Amino acid sequence: MSELHLTEPAPLDLAASSAAVCDAVLKLRGAPLHAALGRIAAALLASPEGSFDAGADPVSAPEEGTLEQDVVAGAEHFGRYRVAGRSYGADDRRQLDSLAGLTATLLQVHALAQRTTHAYAQVEAQLAHQSQILDQIHESVLTTDLMGYITSWNRGAEQLFGYSALEAVGRHILFLYADEDPHHPPEDIPDAFAAQGGRMMEVRRQKKSGEVFWASLSLSPLRDLEDHPIGLIAYLTDITERKQAEERLHHLAYYQELTGLPNRTLFGRLVEQALTVTQRNDAIACVLYIDLNRFKLINGTLGRRVGDELLRRVAERFRGVLRDEDVVAHLSGDEFAVGLFDIRQHFEATTVARKLQACLAAPLKVGEHELRVGASVGIAVYPQDGQDAETLLRMADIAMQRAKEKADNPDRSVAFYRMDMNEGMQQRMQIESGLRHALGHGELVLHYQPKFEIGSSRLVGAEALVRWRHPQRGMVPPGDFIPLAESTGLIVQLGEWVLERACAQAAVWQGAGLPPFRLAVNVSAREFTASLPGRVADTLARYRLDPSWLELEITESTLMHDIDDVIAIMDRINALGVALSLDDFGTGYSSLSYLKRFPINTLKIDRSFTNGLPADTSDCAIASTIISMGRRLGHRVIAEGVETLEQLAFLSEAGCDEVQGYLYAKPLPAYEFETGLRENWLLTTG
């Protein structure tokens, strides 16, 4: 008990006493506070004795000659005031009761403040403790709000990404994504995801240095005190080494380590996937089985190191001649396989086989050795020879063995599994080989078929048509070699030859003083590239040929891709003064909305529509529509394949401008054409 004995206490009124209690509670603690409260009570009641007992229990009645009052707030008992030394009345009791009530309130508030301060201190200590734990763990931990903006960033994240918390907090999480990830917008982190729970995944992320790495990412929802989602907690661990190890294992399982090409297992899977698409498109696919000739001799004589390097060089050459969509595999030893899935006819596989064999014609330099190997190729066709990859590969292997056994030159041996396909292939290969020879040995010639204006019967132009004068077979029909030239790519060389010879002949007629007329040259889709206008300009300049002599005929299929690029090429050709004609119109799929944009001079009605005139009502309707549409668009219209007077009469009545066909003249050699021009046909520049 703390007491203060006052022989002559200094009197205080209730207001002064209340202020003194407030000051004491704010400034003092423990015994000094209790002593001060006792002095204040004695001074208020002018008592010789006054005390505040903090440990006293509540009592029902005070001792004789004393006045006591418990200091109580609600259920809390803080102590008791006691004054003594004189007689006390009801007014004294009321004053002491007021002082006790004020004291109780102040002590209760003070205790609450102390508890709150202590609680805050504990929370701060706990947060600091947790922050230390987060900074010490190996994982990087970060949090984001529901929009994906980073709200916290631990030391592990700093070490993993290279960004400090100051650099990262407040930025959107997308700045950490690797190149392939930014197409995922911020809304890919939805409220629903945070509400439904966590998720684990493997992702690619980017460090401050620019290095891209693999990370294991675990996402968990971040919730507030009411359990509402307010963001995400992300835990990331660098797993680059593990992913690289997995990739190495995958590569070992599915690729030949020596050449880097798919092995037999992966080839089978890739073929199966492609066959699914092929079947859905009702298309054709082929599997080629390739066996190298003389490899075993080289490997046995010069050693495995040279043999391995030789296989790597062969693989590089194979990849160089195949398209991106073709699948090439190294099966084992000196055996390779190729899958072809985007082909129109099975015989196109022979063209690929020839390319593979041709790429091995030049020696392969390995160290100090210049080595030559060849290849025998077997071909299996889907779906005729098999419905799955393994069957097709087995059938192609059988075909390869057959090709090698029966060939005079194994390096040029190619065989289909089915014998009837082989017969067609042999004929095709003979034509292809002969056509290549013809291009360089003067076997090709141009014939010229005149074009006449309806009504006046004046000659307005001619079409240059290539003919093959074979030394043994005689004249080879264009239908036998033009499609082959298109599928093998020889059409480009053939087209260049035709343009060259046609311009040379036109230059002769120009020099002879003949009035100019349009000499039409067919241009294939493969030739119609950005280099064509330059080639045409160079040819005209070389022969000093006026551009009014030349017309280029293009087919509708040429116009089906990259419309803007096609129009740009056509504009450049027109700028040279060379006319453009749309050949075989009506057989393709050109959009009428584009037709008005094409800078063409003439529409040519395909002979497939002319043949039925005038008996076939459908052909009549189509021909009439083409003529009407062409005239409305300001184009001249010519019909090819006109052979009867009835066809001519219909076309004349429908408003067709020009005709071409056997009714007037068949394609003629240059000298016969010139004779007809000078003796029989009137010439007009139209």
Image: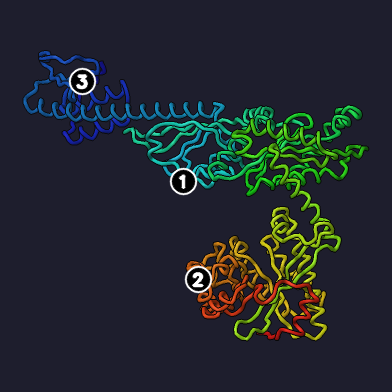
Q: Which mark is residue 620?
A: 2
- Near mark 3 (Cα within 10 A), the count class, few <14, some 14-19 or many ≥20, is some
Q: Quadrant of the C terminus?
A: bottom right
| Residue in front for this viewpoint, 14 or 422 | 422
- Residue at x 53% of width, y 79% of height: 631
Which residue type carries mark 2?
Cys
Which residue type carries mark 1?
Pro
The mark lying in front, picked from 3 and 2, is: 2
Which quadrant of the structure image shows residue 417? top right
Residue 269 position (above or below residue 181)? above
- Residue at x 50% of width, y 76% of height: 628
Q: Which mark is residue 77?
A: 3
Q: Quadrant of the N terminus?
A: top left
- Chain-order first, disc 3 or disc 1: 3
Residue 457 position (above or below residue 481)? below
Q: Which mark is residue 134?
A: none
Which residue has dot 1 on it?
186
| Percent x, y of residue 227 | 33, 32
Q: Report if residue 599 is visible in the image.
A: no
Residue 471 position (above or below residue 186)? below
- Chain-order first, disc 2 or disc 1: 1
Q: Report if residue 436 is visible in the image.
A: yes
Q: CA distance from mark 2 to mark 1?
A: 60 Å
Looking at the image, residue 146 sits to the left or right of residue 573; the answer is: left
- Residue at x 44% of width, y 27% of height: 125
| Percent x, y of residue 182 | 54, 46
The mark lying in front, picked from 3 and 1, is: 1
Looking at the image, residue 206 sits to the left or right of residue 222; the answer is: right
Q: CA distance from mark 3 to mark 1?
A: 59 Å
Q: Mark 3 touching mark 1, by CB under 8 A?
A: no
